[in-house]
Image (cartoon, rainbow, N blue to C red):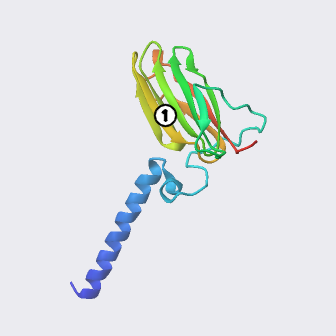
């Protein structure tokens, strides 16, 4: 093999590997936005921007992320029961640090927020924690996918509002 052919072969091989890696990343739902820090809605993303008059969900606690900061740290108890998630709707603002304290009422369960690439499981008698930064304003479904109480598919919504609306 000549030097020119060898270089061409190496370049093509590298391009194929990069292409396969990109397909894998995109199929997992991370999208390039999650990798490159884009402000666009994540892959699988938002179902629309929540109404400005949608009240923020009261939870376990709220505090300023830093003195003088408009961003907040918000904590919520999220329970999976035979009847569904409680609460089944959580409203926060862009930039908030959100902590969900997950508990299972009767059976174990899992929770997935596909657009944010988050997944956690909980078993009866244990509290599990899921923490994330609320990104782009929008409506993001969360659901039980693999381990659901009574075999039911539980669903809920995470609403991320623009700051100050």
Task: Name the residue carrying label 1.
Answer: 112
Vertical order, 36 against 46 (above or below): below
Question: How far across and how far down the image is residue 2, in percent?
Answer: 23, 87
Work out which quarter of the rendered image holds the N terminus and state it. Answer: bottom left
Question: How far across and how far down the image is residue 15, in percent?
Answer: 38, 70
Residue shown at 39%/15% (left/top)?
Answer: 125
Front residue of 122 and 46: 122
Return the residue found at the far left: 1
State whether residue 146 appears in this view: no
Side (left or right) of 74 relative to 125: right
Question: How far across and how far down the image is residue 129, in percent?
Answer: 45, 30
Residue shown at 45%/12% (left/top)?
Answer: 106
Residue shown at 56%/14% (left/top)?
Answer: 83
Side (left or right) of 31 relative to 64: left
Return the residue found at the far right: 53
How would you rate the neighbour count of disc 1 (Cα within 10 Å): few for under 14, some for 14-19, many for 20 or more? some
Vertical order, 9 against 157 (above or below): below
- Hey, which quadrant is residue 70 in on the image? top right
Side (left or right) of 95 relative to 148: right
Question: How far across and how far down the image is residue 110, in percent?
Answer: 44, 27
Front residue of 142 and 126: 126
- Hey, which quadrant is residue 94 in on the image? top right
State whether residue 124 appears in this view: yes
Please count the marks in the image.
1
Work out which quarter of the rendered image holds the C terminus and state it. Answer: top right
Vertical order, 133 against 84 (above or below): below
Vertical order, 129 against 36 (above or below): above
């Amino acid at each position: 093999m000549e030097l020119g052919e060898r270089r061409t072969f190496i370049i093509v091989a590298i391009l194929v590997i990069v292409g396969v890696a990109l397909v894998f990343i995109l199929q997992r739902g991370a999208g390039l936005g999650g990798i490159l820090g884009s402000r666009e809605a994540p892959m699988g993303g938002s179902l629309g921007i929540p109404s400005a008059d949608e009240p923020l969900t009261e939870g376990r606690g709220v505090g300023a992320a830093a003195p003088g900061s408009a961003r907040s740290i918000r904590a919520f108890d999220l329970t999976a029961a035979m009847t569904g998630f409680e609460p089944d709707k959580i409203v926060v603002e862009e930039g908030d640090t959100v902590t969900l304290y997950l508990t299972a009422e009767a059976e174990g369960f899992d929770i997935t927020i596909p657009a944010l690439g988050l997944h956690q499981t909980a078993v009866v008698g244990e509290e599990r924690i899921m923490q994330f930064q609320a990104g782009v304003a929008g409506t993001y479904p969360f659901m039980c996918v693999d381990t659901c109480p009574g075999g039911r598919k539980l669903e809920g919504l995470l609403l991320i509002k623009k700051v100050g609306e």
